[in-house]
Image (cartoon, rainbow, N blue to C red):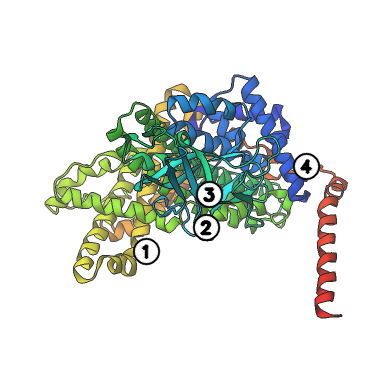
Amino acid sequence: MVNQSLIGPYAELERIYQENRALLISPYTHFLTFKDILKKNVATYKLTQDLFQNKDLDKDLYGGLATVNNAGGLGANGALFFPTLYMLSSDKQRAEWCPDVLAGRIIGGYAQTEMAHGSDIQSLQTTAVFDPATSTFVLNTPKLADCKFWPGGMGVFNTHVVMPARTYIHGKNHGIQTFFIQIRDVKTFEPLEGIEVGDIGAKLGFRSTDNGYLRITNVRIPWNHILMRFFEINEKGEVLVENAESARFGYGGMLNLRNHMVRVGVIIYLRAAIWSYEVAKNQAMSDQNLVASKFLQRMAFAISNSMMTVKLREFHSLFMKVLAANDIKAAKAVLSDLHLMTAGFKSYISWKAIQVSREVLGESSQANLLITERTWDYANVIPQATYEGDNSVLQQQLSRKLIKYIEMLMQGREIKGIGECFNIYTKNVQEKVGLTPFNLEKDDLTLESIGKLLLDITFKNMSSNAERFMMLIGEADLPTAWNAKVQTDLVHMSRLFLIYQGYKYSITHFKEVESKTTKLANHIASNLLLLHGLLKVKQFYDIGVLLGVIVRGGEGYGRLMSEIRKTEDLLKPHIQLIRDSISIDDQEIGIFKDFDSSLIQENAKPTRALASNIEKDFAFNFAKMSKL
C-alpha cells in the first residue's frame, strides 16, 4: 500500500470520517432545499468543532474537516478568517478575540472581494476614516459597486468578518489596513445598524455554500479594532507603528485560501479519476487495459501533485514563521515567491481539475446523475478558473517574474528564491553557450534526469520568449507588446515552469520520506512519479525538439513510448493498492451500492413542494400580467 506519509496525513482523516459518517456526503443531499442544506451545514460544523475541542487532533486535519462539502461556507471560518485574524492581530487582540473563534462563539468570514474590483487589494474602495472626536473608525462601501461580494459564509452564518479597507487617519491615507468587524448579533443573527448583508443567490456550483454580499453605511467601530500586528495606533489616532508591508502581509491570509484551492483542485481531480475507474472496471464491454492505463496516468498526476501540495503548505508555514519572528525583509521575499507559486499552481491545477471533471462526464451514462457527485464537482470547480483572480491573469504575474529572471542572468545577478534553479544557466545566457541536448534513444530516464530535462525545456522557452519580448518593446509600447504580441506564449511559458517546479517539489518530498516508508510503497510511488515525468516529456516532446533540448529524429520518441508502457506494466499489479491508498470513501465520490430509491423519493419532497409553489406563483402572475 502507498504509505500515507507520501501524500499527507490522510489516514487519520479517513478514520475520523468512518467513525463520524455524518461528515460524508449523503446521496440524498442533492434533493434538499437550500434551507435544509444550511441546517445540515450547521450540524456538520458543530460536529467538526466538537471533534477538535474534545479530541487531540492534529491541526493539519482542521482544513480537511472544517471544509468538507457538507460544511459549506462555514469552512471559511477556519481556512481563512481565523488565520488572517491571528496573523495580523497584536498579542492583546489575539487574547481578546481568538478564544471566542476557537470556541465557536464567533463565526467569521473574510470580506475582501468587492463587486467591481474582485480581490485586487490595491483597487479596493471600502473606506475606514478615523474620527478623533469619538476615537472610532467610520466604515463605508461608498458605491454599490464597492460592496463586498462573494465571501463564503457571509450570506447567513457570519457574525464577524476581517475586512481590508482604505484607511484615512487625520486626513492622511495610510493605504489598505485590515479591520475586525461585527456584522450580526451573535444571538439573533440580525444585521447590526448600518449593515446590509445577505446571500447572493443562485450561482454556478457551490449549492451548499451561503456566499454573501455586504454593504456598509457609516458603521462605527472602536479604534482598537484595526488589526495591529504591523500597524499600531492609540485612541487619539497617533500612529505608533507603521509598516508599509502590512497590507501585503494581510494578503497572506488570502494566499492561505489560494493554497487551499490548490489542494481542493487535486482532491476533485482524484474524485473524478477514482469514480471513473470504479465504474469502468465493472463494465463488461470496457477495454480493461485502457481502463488501467487511463487510471494509472491520472493517478501519476494526482499523486505527484499531492506531494507538491505538501511542499506548498511548507512554503506557507515558512512565511508564517519568518513573519512571527518579525523578520520583515525575509517575510517580504518569501511572500513574493509564495504569491507566485500559489497563483501559478491555483491556475494550473484548477485547469486540470476542470478538464478531468468534464472528461469523466462522457465516460459513463451514469455520470450526469446527481447522486454520482460528478455534476456537482464539475459545477464547483469551474468557478475556480476565475475567482480570486482569473487564471490567465495570475499566470501572467508569474510570466513577468520569469522574464525578470532572464534579465538578471544577462546582468550576471544571482537569482534567489524559487528562481534559483536558473542560476546554472548564467554562462549559457551571457556567453550564448548552447545546452547539451537530451538523447531519448540512449540517455537514462530517471526521476532526476527527467527533472533536469523539464528544467532545460523551461529555461530555453523562457529565454526565447524573453528575447522576443525585449525586441518587441523596441517596436511598440509595453502594453501592446505584452497583450497583443506575446501574451499567449507567456501564459504557456508559466505553465511549463509550474510543471517543472511541481515535479521538483514532488521528487523532493518523496526523497524526504523515502526512508520512512516500506519497500513496496517506495516502488509504487517512485514509478508513479516516473510515469508522470515520462508523460510530461511526451507532452513537451515537440517543443523540446524545436528548442534543441531534445535530439531530433532516431528512435527517441519510440523509446519514450516504450518506457511509458513498461512503467505502466510495473504498476498494473498494484492498481488496487493505489486505489486503496487514496483516502476517499466510495460514498464521498458518489458510488452508492444498494441505495433505496424510495429514500430519494422521500427526500425529494421538500424540493418538489418548493418547485411546485414557485411554478404556481409564476403561472398566477403570468396569467395576471397577460390578462389571460
In percent of width and height, residue 29 lies at: 75, 45
Which of the image's four quarters has the C terminus?
bottom right
Query: Image point 27% across, 41% down: which residue?
Result: 421
Residue type, label 4 = Lys
In percent of width and height, residue 167 lies at: 40, 46
In percent of width and height, residue 391 lies at: 45, 55
Asked if the residue at tag 3 contacts the one at tag 1, i.e. Cβ–Cβ closer than 8 Å, the answer is no
Asked if the residue at tag 2 contacts the one at tag 3, i.e. Cβ–Cβ closer than 8 Å, the answer is no
Q: Earlier in the sequence, mark 1 or mark 3?
A: 3
Asked if the residue at tag 1 contacts the one at tag 2, i.e. Cβ–Cβ closer than 8 Å, the answer is no
> Which of 322/397 is in front?
322
Tell me: residue 384, above or below residue 263.
below
Q: Seen in the image, is 310 located left or right of residue 579?
A: left
Query: Image point 56% across, 56% down: which residue?
Result: 382
3D distance between C-alphas at marks 1 and 4 = 46 Å
Residue 488 image label: 1
Q: Is residue 3 visible?
A: no
Q: Earlier in the sequence, mark 2 or mark 4?
A: 2
Residue type, label 3 = Asn
Residue 593 image label: 4
The nearer-to-camera label among 1 and 4 is 1
3D distance between C-alphas at marks 1 and 3 = 45 Å
Residue type, label 1 = Thr
Residue on which disc 2 sits: 115
Query: Image point 26% across, 40% down: which residue?
Result: 420
- Local packing at callout 3 (Cα closer than 10 Å; few below 14, some 14-19, many 20+) is some
The nearer-to-camera label among 1 and 3 is 3
